[in-house]
Amino acid sequence: MKQVVQNYKSGELAVLDVPVPGCKPGGVLVRTAYSLISTGTEMMKVSEAGMSMLGKARSRPDQVAKVMQSVAVNGVPATYRKVMGKLDSYTPLGYSLCGVVEQVGAGIDDVAVGDLVACAGNEHALHAELNWVPKNLYTPLPDGLAPRHAAFGTVGSIALQGVRQGEPQLGETALVIGLGLIGQLVVQLLTASGVRVVGADPDPVRCELAARLGAAACGDPGSAAVETAVAELSGGHGVDQVYLAAGGGSNQPVELAARLSRDRGRVVDIGKCRLDLPWNAYYEKELDVRFSRSYGPGRYDPEYELEGRDYPIGYVRWTERRNLACFLDLLARGSVDVEPLISHIADFDDAVKTYQQLKDGELKAVAVLFRYPDQTEDGNVAAPAVTVPAVRRGDAASAPARSAPVRPAGAPVRLAFVGAGNYASSMLLPHLAEREGVTLSTVVTTTALSAANAQRKFGFTGATTDLDSVLGDPAVDAVFVVTRHSSHAELTRKALLAGKTVFVEKPLALTEDELAGVLAAVEESGNDRLQVGFNRRFAPLLREAKNRFGARTGPASLRYLVNAGRLGHGSWYLQQATEGSRFAGEGGHFIDTASWLLGSDPVSVYAVAPSGAEAGGDVQIMLRYADGSTATIGYVTTGASGFPKETLDLVADGRVLKFDDFVRASVFADGGVGRKRWVSSRLPKARDKGQSAELAAFIRAVRTGGPMPVPLESLVATTSATLAVQTGLAAGTPVTLARPR
């Protein structure tokens, strides 16, 4: 299928051929009829992409701060790869469309194949021929509503939510500053609510349009006409509400809002304009400044948007989805008219040309629609031109187990990736893309564009959203599972049963049942060719320090401090209900490192959390080993961001190993003729945490058929110990670990 994309690094716009997205449970696959270009939000993104790197940095200081924090934690090279990987990728455009339901995912019962729906979301309602849309981001069309009008649903919801934040009442007066697409809709919604509206915009064409759509008066923000109209309509008191629907870097809108508001008036920010509030003006009138968060309650909440968990109507009357349905109803009843806002309808194939015309100012428009190939001139939906591949619903695990194919001598190792997110793209694939004797065969993702990006950047032979086709491909030697934590165990189980050698990023499992399922797959298939991405034991500096420390004769004491830091708002690590606790997700790294240094697997785990600590936050773990050794892991999220992330000390037999965050290591020892000391000779160029060496060992095992880099028993023991942390926290007692069979 085709999708409009942009490379944020170069600014390139393209209509790209990408795989059809899979129809996941909890949502529907929608074939687009019309999608709407947001001439404000989207064109701002398009313009930013055309800036220099310095210009991009100035426009997004929040992202610059994240980069600097990453440099402090991961070093310059790793951060550079991560940032460039994100910048030099195709990103999607679009967030408002109308289309036809093509497939219905499990758990959906409110629409059927062939129904028309309006869809929202900058990850789901894209300028693409097909989109997978979760339940709370689509709504069926009322009877008789034209698809091209329903394509305005998302921007209509944004305007509607802004109006709700202003709490308009019959007979009040409002000022709308900025008469672009959102401003024009706000004017109509306020007028329909019985509010008298004054519009302000420097463009006389937009002012004229707003007047035709119901505004009592319109004019340039700097003209006396606007102030005169406000005085006449409000009896000299000032407007009850001001809606900031303007963009740009001028502070004029907030200053005008203060000047023309009544005492204790309401100022609602809907757009993205400069907000240097003049303190005296806002203080003296005690103005109520409010923000409107996009489409309404539920926005940016993954449980609402992705998992379909609705808010009770008794507590949250107007959610994203209910706002979307309300706006469509207003359109269907004629209370809002979007037809006059449509400046241009372009064929989808002309998308790049259309964006360029908008950017250059050749096309001056309030709203532009893309019409897709299956859409007829009269607005009816024709037969589909895009064929959705048949999805095999059967579980790949039900296929008979088979051994991995015998590899001809000298043949390249063929790898498939399931998942191509940030970690895979920055930490794994760069080490594999140009490795001799390795072929990147197929990348599988649930979203079309991430697969296409990985294929373009790393040279995969193919890209798909169909997992079963990859597991059933006898030419694939090994499968990398690099998806979200909640899917690791099931995908690993399927790949093992399909006879594949598997590399799965940590964690292997989030529950004992998931771990048991993986082990059952190993037993059923006889395939134990498994590696978990515990890379730290492969780090060159740590391996050298261990060798310098030497063999032990007595028990050891290990202390490991992990200064994990706080997570940013919106991180999927915070989705503990589905993705497990943060420690469950990455704690295996540190337990594996401790066990490797001590040369055995733990026999018991005792975990405690500081009083009042947030769930999934700070935790202290004591591991005991059969030879009497102990390891204490302090996993903290409340430390200083400037302190190293990982530091450890290993003490035994009159020796101390000190390791500082993959940058410096030293060993102190008491000898027969005095004290000895070894210190790593120089600072490494980067924090090498072992990914390259780990991948080399894995590829070697796949190529030769030799033992896996880490025994299965050790992987299981580390996973069991990680899971026991949560069990121990709940019980408040030590947990004895069963020995792996």
Image: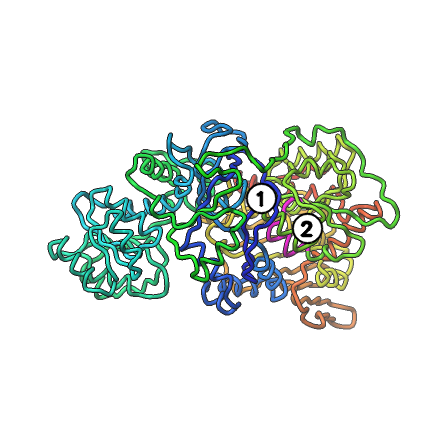
**For this rendering, which residue is in front, 108 or 696?**
108
347, above or below 664, in the image: above
Horizontally, residue 491 falls left or right of residue 612, namely right
Rendering quarter of residue 263: bottom left
User: x%, y% of residue 264?
Assistant: 18, 55
Horizontally, residue 444 falls left or right of residue 179, namely right
User: x%, y% of residue 473?
Assistant: 75, 38
Locate the N terminus by quadrant.
top right
Residue 419 falls inside the magenta stretch: yes
Identify which amino acid the numbered label 2 is placed on: Phe
Disc 2 designates what residue?
Answer: 534
Identify which amino acid the numbered label 1 is placed on: Thr
User: x%, y% of residue 377?
Assistant: 46, 39
Q: Which-is-in-front pick, marks 2 and 1? A: 1
714, above or below 57, in the image: above
Earlier residue among tags 2 and 1:
1
- Element at label 2: loop
Disc 1 designates what residue?
Answer: 447
- Element at label 1: loop
Tell me, for residue 589, which label it has, or none: none
**For this rendering, which residue is in front, 127 or 253?**
127
Could you tell me how far apart the alpha carbons at marks 2 and 1 are, in whole angstroms? 27 Å
| Outermost left residue | 235
